[in-house]
Image (cartoon, rainbow, N blue to C red):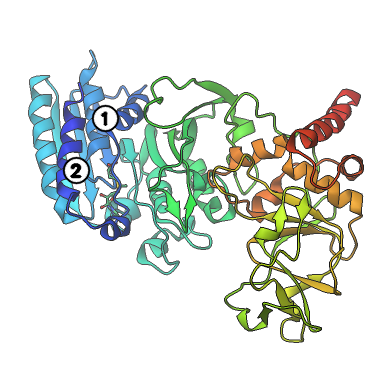
């Protein structure tokens, strides 16, 4: 057992050993470990019972994922009579490895009465005829695609424009392009970062995928692997299994592990598909990661409450000539992430450039000095909660204030938030319920405005009641108790 995957792993390592990290990053070349490859393949092959199995590994590397599929099929008592394997790989150094692996698998398959053919092609999969012209070709598609951002005008993005909204990531294009390549009931399995499950940039990918595929199962690795980093935002990795062009099932199987070592023992939970995959155009995917994750059962949104969330308009390097180390009569406060703590704002803190000129030229980047809720857009990964929010009640000097771009702010356009509303919203956002929501929709530590817009919010009356009971600098435990008691009261009354 493990003969093909071990071979692919060892050969892949020696072929890429001399590669500089930059070169590896440019190709998105991070190989799958054998135990993960086998876990992916075993579930992907479940229910594949055609006599001729056509397999595609579109970003093949050393071919470990397809090797795991072939290994799984050959282990069965009832084997297929024929396996047709297609590898696509951009890096010429890996082509001889794929050929050697193919030859080895072909020989061993033959001894088990299975005829195996292997096609190894060097080139860009996304621009290949398979990806751009074909449909319904394969019974199993398995991939660990490259991961990096592409320019919107890159040929790969233009060839798969149906899956592009904003700046594409190459891995999303692999997901979308392969979804339509499976024969009905064909199986699809990808290991990727978790970022495709949420956010507007991946909405077109999700829409396209979900039009062709039904998601069967998802596994999340909670310890973030270093290789899924994006502008220093660490990403969790996940595996998704899906089936092509079949009726939906009521449940999706969800599991989590810290990493590879506890993967085999990860507990499986069956959760209603409707709770996981959003039915709207955005098709966000929310993954409750533990049984304690009770999402807020509220039915308002920021929009329905007449509130808006925006990102701080001051981009420091563009606005540098307006930023100042010292206060003077033309400056107003400029708030950065460092000024915001959970339920508290401290300004000034003797931080560099915490003042901004209030003049005609800078006026567009200033906001009215009125009550609002401020949130950090990023949190350190070891932070206990994803969201850090504070109520700003309007106590700083000046008619306006500056908000740096690493902050989001919630306000009432054309109106004013009361102190209790601001306090209530901040407390709710810092609560355990909202933390569970953010962990379920986002695999990174980023808190995006898009997800905030979709967050279920309590009513204004409830938020006000929470705000009246909360105080600045309150502990997380006390916030949870307060928010929980007011939301539970509503549930009991209902
Ligand atoms: C993340 S690695 C995974 C390799 C292998 N499937 C595995 O799981 O170990 C992605 C592979 O895709 C290759 N690659 C990158 N861009 C590609 C493209 N546009 N078309 C085909 N292969 C590509 C890289 O050279 C790399 O070998």
**Which residue corresponds to mark 1?**
69
Task: Work out which quarter of the rendered image holds the C terminus and state it.
Answer: top right
**Residue 210 seen by the camera:** yes
Residue 459 image label: none
**Residue 119 seen by the camera:** no
Kind of element beneath mark 1: helix
Residue at x 73% of width, y 50% of height: 389
Kind of element beneath mark 2: helix
**Position in image of residue 454 (x %, y %):** 70, 47
**Front disc: 1 or 2:** 2
Q: Please report whichever mark, 1 or 2, sits nearer to the chain's N-terminal start.
A: 2
Q: Residue furthest top?
A: 77
Label 2 Cα neighbours within 10 Å, binned few <14 / some 14-19 / many ≥20: few
* On screen, residue 432 above or below 123: above
* On screen, residue 359 above or below 421: below
**Position in image of residue 162 (x %, y %):** 48, 57
> Any atom of ligand 1 within 8 Å of the CB at mark 1?
no
**Which residue corresponds to mark 2?**
13
Label 1 Cα neighbours within 10 Å, binned few <14 / some 14-19 / many ≥20: many
Task: Work out which quarter of the rendered image holds the N terminus and state it.
Answer: top left
Is 82 left, or right, of 32 in this rendering? left
Q: Residue furthest front?
A: 350
């Amino acid at each position: 057992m493990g003969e093909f995957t071990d071979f692919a792993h060892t050969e892949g390592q020696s072929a890429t050993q001399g590669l500089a990290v930059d070169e590896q990053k440019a190709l998105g070349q991070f190989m799958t470990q054998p135990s993960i490859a086998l876990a992916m393949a075993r579930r992907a092959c479940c229910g594949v019972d055609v006599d001729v199995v056509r397999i595609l590994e579109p970003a093949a590397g050393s071919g470990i994922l397809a090797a795991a599929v072939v290994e799984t099929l050959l282990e069965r008592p009832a084997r297929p009579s024929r396996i047709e394997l297609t590898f696509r790989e951009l890096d010429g150094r890996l082509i001889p490895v794929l050929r050697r692996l193919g030859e080895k698998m072909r020989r061993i398959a033959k001894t088990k009465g299975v005829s195996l053919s292997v096609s190894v092609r060097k080139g860009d999969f996304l621009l290949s005829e398979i990806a751009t012209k074909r449909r319904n070709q394969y019974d199993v598609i398995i991939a660990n695609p490259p991961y990096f951002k592409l320019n919107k005008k890159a040929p790969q993005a233009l060839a798969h424009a149906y899956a592009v909204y904003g700046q594409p990531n190459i891995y999303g294009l692999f997901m979308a392009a392969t979804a339509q390549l499976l024969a009905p009931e064909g199986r699809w399995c990808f290991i990727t970062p978790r970022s495709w499950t949420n956010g507007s940039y991946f909405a077109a990918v999700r829409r396209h995928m979900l039009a062709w595929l039904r998601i069967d199962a998802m596994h999340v690795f909670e310890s973030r692997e270093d290789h899924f980093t994006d502008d220093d935002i660490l990403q969790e990795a996940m595996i998704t299994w899906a089936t092509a062009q079949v009726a939906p099932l009521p449940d999706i199987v969800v599991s989590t592990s810290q990493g590879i070592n506890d993967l085999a023992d990860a507990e499986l939970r069956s959760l209603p598909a409707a709770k996981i995959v959003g039915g709207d155009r955005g098709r966000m995917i929310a993954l409750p990661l533990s049984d304690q994750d009770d999402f807020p059962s509220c039915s308002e949104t920021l929009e329905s409450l007449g509130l808006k969330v925006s990102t701080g308009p001051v981009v420091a390097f563009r606005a540098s000539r307006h930023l100042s180390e010292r206060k003077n009569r033309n400056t107003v406060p400029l708030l950065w992430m460092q000024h915001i703590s959970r339920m508290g704002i401290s300004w000034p803190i003797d931080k560099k450039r915490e003042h901004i000129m209030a003049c005609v030229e800078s006026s567009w980047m200033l906001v009215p000095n009125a009550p609002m809720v401020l949130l950090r857009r990023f949190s350190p990964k070891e932070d206990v909660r994803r969201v850090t929010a504070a109520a700003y009640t309007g106590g700083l000097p000046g008619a306006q204030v500056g908000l740096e771009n690493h902050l989001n702010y919630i306000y009432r356009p054309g109106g004013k938030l009361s102190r209790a509303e601001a306090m209530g919203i901040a407390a709710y956002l810092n609560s355990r319920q909202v933390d569970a929501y953010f962990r379920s929709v986002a695999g990174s530590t980023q808190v995006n405005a898009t997800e905030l817009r979709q967050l279920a919010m309590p009513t204004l009356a409830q938020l006000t009641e929470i705000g009246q009971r909360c105080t600045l600098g309150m502990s997380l435990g006390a916030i949870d108790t307060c928010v929980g008691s007011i939301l539970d009261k509503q549930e009991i009354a209902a």
